[in-house]
Amino acid sequence: MPAEVCLHPDAERELRSAFLWYLERNQTVAESFEAEVDHAIGVIAESPGRWPRLSKGARRYVFPRFPFSLVYRVKPTYVEVLAIAHQKKRPGYWQGRLPSAT
């Protein structure tokens, strides 16, 4: 059974910002980006332990067609998406969203 996936409020803002950026340039590309995000959420829901570990228990799914990663952590009852992170901008900025005792 797939895990429930919840987005951190900052991840929701990043998703919206990236989608709008693509939408201003090309609706088809924006829709492809949205589909890529939906796919990423689906695969981490199905198998959250499959993707590489980062620091403090976080994991990362790298988008195959866009320069973004979905950074998440597995909680006991759900998966939390911490960031929709651009791969070339501010590496590791999302680490502040993790508790320091993890």
Image (cartoon, helix red, strand yellow):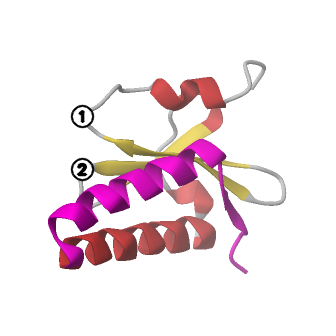
Pointer 1 residue: 88
Say whether residue 90 is left or right of residue 1.
left
Q: Residue 66, located in which quarter of the rendered image?
A: bottom left
Say whether residue 78 is left or right of residue 50.
right
Number of dots carrying numbers: 2
Magenta stretch: residue 6 in it?
Answer: yes
Give the camera-side residue of 11 and 87.
11
Q: Amino acid at mark 2?
A: Pro
Give the camera-side residue of 3 and 22.
22
**Residue at image coords 30%, 77%:** 31
Using the numbered discs, state the Cα–Cα distance from disc 2 to disc 1 in whole angstroms: 7 Å
Pointer 2 residue: 67
Q: Is residue 71 visible?
A: no
Q: Outermost residue toward the left? A: 25
SS at circle 1: loop
**Residue at image coords 42%, 67%:** 37
Give the camera-side residue of 15 and 46.
15
Give the camera-side residue of 3 and 29.
29
Image: magenta residue range: 1-27
Q: Amino acid at mark 1?
A: Lys
Image quarter where the C terminus lies is top right
Percent x, y of residue 77: 83, 59
User: Can you say whether 17 is above or below 40 in the image?
Assistant: above
Q: Outermost residue toward the right? A: 77
**Residue at image coords 67%, 30%:** 98
Q: Are marks 2 and 1 in contact (CB under 8 Å)?
A: yes
Percent x, y of residue 95: 56, 26
> In the rendered structure, which disc, 2 or 1, sits on the residue that comes first in sequence?
2
Q: Outermost residue toward the top? A: 100
**Residue at image coords 53%, 67%:** 41
